[in-house]
Image: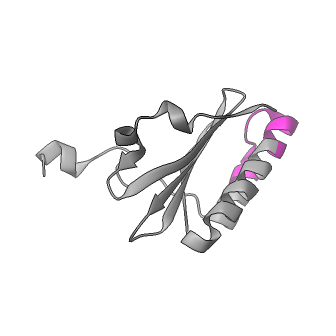
Amino acid sequence: MEWKDVTNYFTEEQRHYKNTYLEIDYVGNDKIELGLYSSKDDLYEIYVNFGIMFGIVYVKKEDANKIFYEIKNRIEEEYMKNKEPSDEFINGFDRKYGLSLPNDLFFDMDKLFKI
């Protein structure tokens, strides 16, 4: 599996999103994306996009890098085995990491009301 670090393709402005900052963004075989976002005040966010499975894993700052690379390895293993996340994988992943949909995925109040 080939992973590309695409972090530097984003401008400094693009790397800032609300109260987070894109630290690392990897794309695997042009099919998977994993991003690590830091925050000064809140939990860090690990963005996961693998087939039909996508969302955010919220982690403490001190655990962020370890969990990011653990997730990367688990997803790579599943990709090498099935090319897409199986139902069993998705359910186990969610139980272990608590995958959540981003709050602003469908509705961003700030942009809608120009707050």
**Which quadrant of the structure image shows residue 31?**
top right
Residue drawn at (17%, 43%) of the image = 112
Residue drawn at (42%, 44%) of the image = 15
Q: Position of residue 12 (x, y in %)?
A: 39, 41
Q: Position of residue 9 (x, y in %)?
A: 50, 30
As drawn, 15 above or below 38: above
As drawn, 63 above or below 70: below
Q: Is residue 78 left or right of residue 66?
A: right
The residue furthest top is 30
Query: Which range is magenta?
Result: 77-90
As drawn, 61 above or below 111: below
Q: Is residue 87 left or right of residue 47?
A: right
Q: Is residue 79 magenta?
A: yes
Main SS, magenta residues: helix
Q: Position of residue 76 (x, y in %)?
A: 79, 42
Residue drawn at (29%, 46%) of the image = 107
Residue 60 appears in the rendering: no
Q: Nearer the viewer, residue 103 or 67?
A: 67
Q: How many marks?
A: 0
Q: Is residue 88 magenta?
A: yes
Indicate how the structure is coloured in the image. one colour
Q: Nearer the viewer, residue 8 or 1?
A: 8
